[in-house]
Image: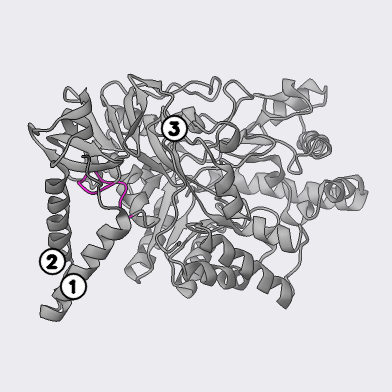
Amino acid sequence: MRHEIPNNACFNQAFNTKLDLSHEEGNIVQNPFHRLQLLSLLLVLVSEIAFSADIDLLIRDARVVDGTGSPWFVSDVAIDDGRIVGMAVNLAADADQEIDAAGRVLAPGFIDVHTHVESSANNEGLERLPRADNYLLDGVTTIITGNCGSSEVDIGAYQDRLTDLGINVATLVGHNAIRSTVIGLDNRAPTTGELREMQRLVDKAMQDGAVGLSTGLLYVPGTYATTQEVVDLAKVAAQYGGVYASHMREQGAKLHESINEAVQIGREAKMPVQISHLKVKGRTRWGTIGDALELIESHRRAGVDVVVDAYPYERASTNLGVNLPRWAVAGGSADIAARIDDPETNERMVNEMKDMLVDGGYPDYSFATVAQFGPEPAYIGRTISEINRTLERSATTDNEIRTIFDLMIDGGAAGNIQGASMVYHYMSMDDVDTIFRYPNAAVASDGSIIAHGKGQPHPRSYGTNAKVLSDFVRERNVMTLEDAVRRMTSLPARTFSFHDRGIVRPGFVADLILFDPDKVADKATFTDPHQYSEGFDYVIVNGVVAVANGTPTDERAGMFVKHSGAM
């Protein structure tokens, strides 16, 4: 008869009971070392229980990089009922399936803290492509969506629609989504009643399992919110143990002010802070990211739990509308078009857009490439400067801004209020390297699930993790293998309170990957992005083999992952 591994709730109950007894006997609950001793004892007990019967899967002779940052070690790993039940050299166990690791690296499945997998005009979404091949084949077993303030509002209904998943998914609830539901896209403050309704929607989302609150304070309508409005909503999410994840207001001239605002919200709401896709934008500021990291570290020294995430590329991707002043994109597509058509307003917009170019150190818009544009697919892969020439306009800043206005209007008429999806050369690679040397920087893709071959998206949706392992670890030694794996596993897991994921250890969920670090490679490029990563031979999701010998299987063991305070 097959045994059942204790579920996480039972495991935590046993752990907490032991801690309570220890507290009465000598207050050792306050000693983190003793807490770890007790946890290790319980894990050993779980492991001993496991071998009273056959198991589902046994991985032999693995070089385990366990996710903690510790040096690798050799071990067999036994898996049953979705959890790791034993680890040792030469385990004596009968398994339904056995994999010979042959010295390859066994690591926790990667946890991507920043994705956008809701269905949209430019994104097929997890509902349409639930196996999520581009993530599975990049070693990812869990994704967190709902970032940058954009999410489903009814998290319970969203969970019900997510069926037949190939990977695990958790979601934040987005401030922009909540605000637009209650207020719309207007540039104004909420009324008292509207604020209460937004708080109610956040509360409902957290009850339904959201892992925290996200903001996109660069985007409409979040950009029109005061800091206090966000604090009032964040306090609701904090009651459930949620995280505050922010696409900050500014990543250029006001980067430091934006960092301080994000930390202030976390401090006042009493919740951890995740700064999304940290970067410094604009050639005029390249080389200054170290100052921002020192500011973040000063907040940590002051007692605020703030961490960051970043993707390993010097180019970003967002919408076309970010090139316009924030006031100019309030309301809907008709409102934006009306401002463009009004001569006086148009002149004001043009002048401010020229100032934005100068501030960033850009002579023109050749740094901006179209990734998706429904009305004219021929524009995909071309810069604004190139499209301007295609339209037989002279190469002036005024004409390139006119071209942007045309794309905004045409895209809005086609249903994309922000005109088009774009790729921008905002950052320097030296700054990206500096971020990845910061110990509290997690790896994130900021990617999505898209139909293979559709458009010319940012390659991060395919190759983020493989690029870290091949370029940042193997080729350029920016970080060690063990530390890189930590940034993709236990660091995200602890930030989002996934207490039984992100480490290879008995009792933990068996989300695992097996790869040869000398062969892992990202294949996706900016000119040819639709290429899957290579080298992740096995991907195991909740104890089930989802990728075998580098090929996705028909198994779908993914699940919706809730925060620890959800019912």
Q: Quadrant of residue 193 in the image?
A: bottom right
Question: Mark 1 or mark 2, which is nearer the start of the sequence?
Answer: 1
Question: Mark 3 or mark 1, which is nearer the start of the sequence?
Answer: 1
Callout 2–callout 1 Cβ contact below 8 Å: yes
Q: Secondary structure at mark 1?
A: helix
Q: Position of residue 327 (x, y in %)?
A: 76, 57
Q: Secondary structure at mark 3?
A: loop
**CA gap, disc 1 to disc 3?**
40 Å
Q: Nearer the viewer, mark 3 or mark 2?
A: 3
The magenta stretch is 499-508
For the residue pair 1 and 383, the one nearer the viewer reads as 1
Amino acid found under the numbered disc labelled 3: Arg
Q: Position of residue 424 (x, y in %)?
A: 59, 36
Q: Position of residue 274 (x, y in %)?
A: 45, 57
Residue at 76%, 57% in the rendered image:
185
Residue 502 is one of the magenta-drawn residues: yes
Q: Position of residue 520 (x, y in %)?
A: 32, 24
Amino acid found under the numbered disc labelled 2: His
Amino acid found under the numbered disc labelled 1: Val
**CA gap, disc 2 to disc 1?**
7 Å
